[in-house]
Amino acid sequence: MCVESGLVFKSETAFFMSKILFLYMPNHNITRHIEALIFSSSQSISTQEIILALNAVFNEEFIEEQVFESIEQIKEKYSQDDLAIELVFLNNGYQFLTKKDYHETVNQLQLHRSKKKLSQAAMETLAIIAYRQPITKLEIEQIRGVNSDYSVQRLLEKELISIDGKAETPGRPILYRTSTLFMDYFGLNSLNQLPQLKDIVKEENSVGENVEQIN
């Protein structure tokens, strides 16, 4: 009986030690694979998504501790001053972003591209949805004062907004809200990080006055 207990103990110990070795050995060089996954993802990638990808490739059961350890190594690697990007936790996942020192430079490019990709009408519609979500198309049109079919469709196509069920009102109109891609694009962890309306209303009014003068 004691011999059997000893065998069981040794077996459990060997299993435990194999897990420890597997956790700390540089097998598969999983850190580089995780780095590649994060780099190739257009959106924030969660630890669960990383684990699923690794399990499928190596046919082994990876655990969160392994992923977290590799992520810490990647963070340390990109914390060096001579690199312009860093690994950040954003929107319940990980993503490579440019460091703060380069935000203004990158922002100029993003502004240039956003003007080409989204019309003023689409930007207005997106802003209304961001601050009033969930919201119906009729409510958007009541605020803008114009038909918003095209703008809503464009935002759906670009995956900046998503459908959030239907309103409990006559006709059950569709509700819209901002998407995960919207959070990633504007670098937000929470909608609470959106600028307060009181902070931007003055600027919006001045823009409106300028437009009226030009017209």
Image (cartoon, rainbow, N blue to C red):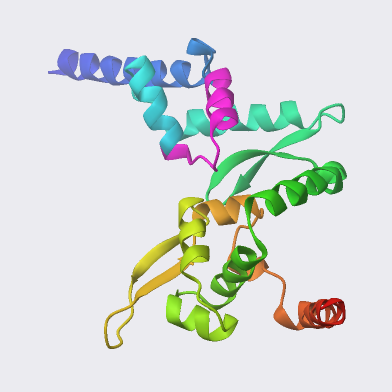
**In magenta segment, residue 32:** yes
138 vs 161: above or below: below
Q: Quadrant of residue 208?
A: bottom right
Horizontal placement of 171 versus 1: left or right? right
Percent x, y of residue 131: 59, 75
Residue 107 spot, x, y in % from top left = 79, 49
Instruction: Please say if 138 is above or below 47.
Output: below
Q: In this view, does 67 lie to the left or right of 187?
A: left
> Which quarter of the rendering shows the N terminus?
top left
Residue at 58 percent of width and 18 percent of height:
32
The single residue placed furthest to the left in the displayed view is: 1
Left or right: 122 as drawn, with respect to 167: right
* Residue closest to the eye, 137 or 163: 137
Q: Residue at x 64, y 32 (%)?
A: 72
Q: Nearer the viewer, residue 6 or 44?
A: 44
The question of residue 160 being in magenta is answered with: no
**Image position, residue 47 (x, y; %):** 47, 38
Residue drawn where x is 43% and y is 69% of the image: 176
Which is more toward the observer, 66 or 116?
116
Query: Could you tell me which quadrant the C terminus lies in?
Result: bottom right
- Which stretch appears magenta? 31-48
* Residue most extreme to the front: 215
Vertical side of 157 occupied by 191: above or below? below
State the count of labels: 0
Left or right of 133? Residue 212 is right
Please name whichever residue, 180 or 12, is drawn nearer the observer in this view of the structure.
180
Q: Which residue is drawn at 86% across and 78% down?
A: 210
Residue 108, position in %: x, y? 82, 48
**Main SS of residues in magenta:** helix
